[in-house]
Image (spheres, rainbow, N blue to C red):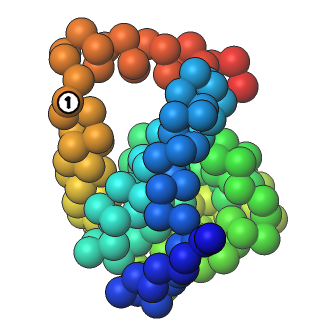
Amino acid sequence: MNEEIQHEEGTTEICPRAKEWAKNAFSGDIAYLLNEAASSARTSVTTALAPIGITPRQMSILRLLSIQAPIRQHELGSLLSIDRTSMVAAIDGLEAMGYVVREVDPNDRRAHAIQLTQAGVAIDEAARIAVDSAAQSMVEHLTVEERETLLSILGKLTSRS
């Protein structure tokens, strides 16, 4: 007999032990574990950025702009695998917050080049600090050697895509 449990947030859970059962069932499944780690990381980063008022996608845009700017809007979208419509909306939001400006690209007057404002530089720095803190919390139980190994493995996995 499955008993529903009501949580404070108003959500219900049919089986409170399901997550633990899944963890045991998939303990040797690389794809499952990577997905769970990615989900946990997304949640941590989203939570860390919430007080700053930006999303992980917006943080990614700001981060790239802090490294390479100005950059054309479509190139930025391509680098981050963000479709054109979503990219326009993301830039609109960042522009409304005062973090980026669109300028006509001097090499192609049909294109817009995006760059950070001073406020964008400041929020990017705040985001870096918040995300670095969240990342440290995620791996605090690992040794320095394990962290280095994890970074190396993740680098190899992401360079294949």
Report whether residue 57 is seen. yes
* 9 lies above or below 3: below
Q: Is residue 26 left or right of residue 87?
A: left
The answer to whether 13 is drawn above or below residue 65 in the figure is below
Q: Residue at x 36, y 55 (%)?
A: 44
Instruction: Locate the C terminus and report the quarter of the image it occupies.
Output: top right
Tell me if residue 105 can be seen: no
Q: Nearer the viewer, residue 153 or 91?
A: 153
Question: Is 38 on the left-hand or right-hand side of 129?
Answer: right
Identify the residue at image location x=29%, y=14%: 146
Q: Tag 1: Cα neighbours inside 10 Å, few (<14), some, or many (≥20)?
A: few
Residue 50 point in image, percent of width and height: 33, 72
Position of residue 24 relative to residue 81, above or below, is: above
Tell me the amino acid under the disc marked 1. Answer: His
Q: Residue at x 24, y 56 (%)?
A: 130
Helix, strand or loop for disc 1: loop
Q: Residue at x 19, y 33 (%)?
A: 140
Could you say where residue 87 lies in the image, as x and y percent from the top left? 68, 65
Relative horizontal placement of residue 81, taking residue 69 as reference (left or right): right
Instruction: Identify residue for label 1.
Output: 141
**Where residue 19 sits in the image (x, y, percent)?**
51, 52
Q: Name the image quarter holding the N terminus.
A: bottom right
- Can you tell which quarter of the image residue 99 is in? bottom left
Residue situated furthest front in the rendering? 1
